[in-house]
């Protein structure tokens, strides 16, 4: 139903107009392909039909389509300072200029694709989704989180945070952030104060993974394990990191 090669080619043509040599753009291009692969692997683990596996992959390819126009218009990936990139991307796909028509011929899956793209970055998914739409939304959300671990390992920290890693490592983990690790859920943005809060905040995404295979994929890819080897001279922070590491490892092996 979906021609992967054609979709990849269309995606390449689309992103070409946004300067793929810009590291911010190339980061999002690589992320897109990785998330699409993760989505496909999760969908396969759920024994979905071939069509549904292809839809899960396509949602992966399209989930961050709003990022490119976001950076062009606002010169930032910060949604708070610009637009919600998920809503923005879904509008580009399904309102104007109706990009979706280029990527898939049938309109049968539009509601699922649109909802999953809109839901992919929300703190919690909407409660009123039907089971099938919720499943596709959870697949992209898991796939995206798994690749965020890779990005934190592979991309230069200073490029992401704007300050040297040594500077971040000397910082504290705020009390309210640490409390949320004890509760085994991801960290609310509004409670993050230090750069360290943001850095370790990514680790907490592991608590939110919905599908068992997503936890397996996270372990197999090894990026989160690598992140958890974090060592610092700040004794208070190190104690908290050791605790966080244990809690996350417990959760991954559940
Ligand atoms: Fe995103």
Image (cartoon, rainbow, N blue to C red):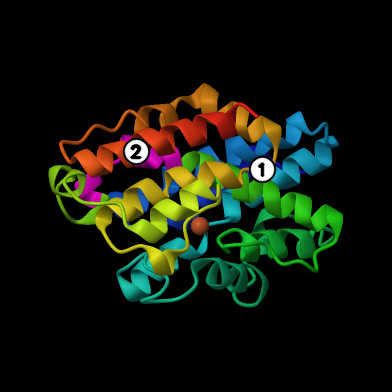
Q: Quadrant of the image for the N terminus?
A: top right
Q: What is the count of numbered marks?
A: 2
Q: What element does badge 2 sit on?
A: helix
Q: Earlier in the sequence, mark 1 or mark 2?
A: 1
What residue does disc 2 label? 241
Magenta stretch contains residue 191: no
Q: Is residue 102 left or right of residue 218?
A: right
In the rendered image, the residue lying farthest to the top is 220
The residue at 26%/56% (across/down) is 195
Q: Quadrant of residue 67?
A: bottom left
Percent position of residue 94, x then y: 67, 71
Is residue 73 shown above or below 63?
Answer: below
Q: What element does badge 1 sit on?
A: helix
Q: Is residue 84 left or right of residue 18?
A: right
Would you say the beta carbon of the disc 1 residue lies within 8 angstroms of ligand 1?
no
Is residue 94 shown above or below 153?
Answer: below
How packed is label 2: few (under 14 Cα within 10 Å), some, or many (20 or more)? many
The residue at 61%/68% (across/down) is 90
The residue at 47%/57% (across/down) is 187
Is residue 190 shown above or below 248?
Answer: below
How packed is label 1: few (under 14 Cα within 10 Å), some, or many (20 or more)? many
Q: Which mark is residue 57?
A: 1
Residue 95 visible in rendering: yes
- Residue stretch in magenta: 148-159
Percent position of residue 233, x then y: 15, 36
As measured in the structure, the alpha-carbon distance from the residue carrying label 1 to the one carrying label 2 is 34 Å
Residue 22 visible in rendering: no
Q: Of 45 and 95, which appears nearest the observer?
A: 45
The residue at 70%/38% (across/down) is 211
Q: Is residue 25 left or right of residue 106?
A: left
Q: Is residue 142 left or right of residue 20?
A: right
Q: Quadrant of the image for the C terminus?
A: top right
């Amino acid at each position: 139903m979906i021609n992967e090669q054609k979709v990849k080619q269309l995606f390449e043509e689309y992103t070409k107009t946004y300067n793929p040599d810009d590291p911010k753009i190339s980061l999002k291009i690589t992320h897109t392909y990785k998330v699409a692969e993760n989505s496909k692997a999760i969908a396969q683990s759920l024994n979905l039909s071939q069509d549904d596996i292809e839809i899960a992959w396509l949602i992966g390819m399209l989930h961050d389509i709003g990022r490119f126009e976001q950076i062009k218009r606002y010169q930032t990936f910060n949604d708070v300072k610009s637009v919600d990139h998920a809503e923005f991307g879904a509008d580009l796909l399904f309102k104007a200029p109706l990009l979706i028509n280029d990527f898939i011929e049938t309109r049968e899956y539009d509601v699922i694709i649109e909802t999953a793209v809109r839901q992919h970055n929300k703190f919690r998914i909407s409660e009123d989704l039907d089971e099938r739409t919720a499943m596709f939304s959870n697949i992209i959300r898991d796939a995206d989180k798994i690749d965020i671990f890779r990005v934190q390992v592979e991309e230069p920290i200073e490029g992401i945070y704007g300050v040297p890693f040594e500077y971040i490592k000397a910082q504290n983990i705020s009390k309210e952030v640490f409390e949320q690790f004890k509760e085994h859920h991801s960290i609310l943005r509004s409670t993050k104060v230090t750069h360290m809060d943001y850095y370790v905040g990514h680790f907490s995404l592991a608590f939110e993974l919905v599908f068992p295979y997503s936890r397996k994929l996270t372990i197999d890819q090894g990026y989160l394990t690598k992140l958890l080897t974090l060592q610092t001279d700040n004794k208070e922070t190190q104690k908290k990191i050791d605790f966080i590491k244990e809690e996350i490892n417990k959760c991954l092996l559940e």
